[in-house]
Image: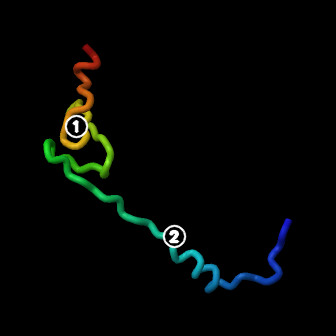
Amino acid sequence: MAHPKRKISKTRRDKRRTHYKAVMPQIAVDPTTGEAHLYHRAHWHEGKLYYRGQVVIDSEEVQA
């Protein structure tokens, strides 16, 4: 296996890692329910699955 010829300094190592950042996920508010959720994701609210303000799945219809 390949081995480094010289030790990589802490400064050089940290310069390479400057681009690794934690980012806050964007939060959207559903216009129908007012529920906060991640963008482009469906979310459950009171037994119903909503996406872009519309009911996609109603859990009561599925069980019946």
Image quarter of residue 12: bottom right
Q: Residue at x 28, y 19 (%)?
A: 62
The amino acid marked with disc number 2 is Tyr
Q: Residue at x 26, y 28 (%)?
A: 57
Q: Residue at x 47, y 69 (%)?
A: 21
In the picture, which quadrant includes the N terminus?
A: bottom right
Note whether 57 is above or below 63 in the view shown. Answer: below
Task: Judge by depth and name the residue closer to the eye, 55 or 33.
Answer: 55
Q: Classify residue 42 as left or right of residue 18.
A: left
Horizontal and vertical percent for residue 11? 61, 86
> Which residue of the protein is positioned furthest toward the right in this rendering?
1
Horizontal and vertical percent for residue 31? 15, 47
Residue 7: mark in rendering: none
- Count of numbered circles on the image: 2
Note whether 18 is above or below 58 in the view shown. Answer: below
Horizontal and vertical percent for residue 6? 79, 83
Tag 2 secondary structure:
loop
Q: Classify residue 38 as left or right of residue 35.
A: right
- How crowded pointer 1 is (Cα within 10 Å; few <14, some 14-19, many 20+) is rated as few
Q: Residue at x 30, y 41 (%)?
A: 42
Tag 1 secondary structure:
strand
Q: Identify the residue under disc 2.
A: 20
Residue 45: mark in rendering: 1
Q: Classify residue 34 as left or right of residue 40.
A: left
Q: CA distance from mark 1 to mark 2?
A: 34 Å
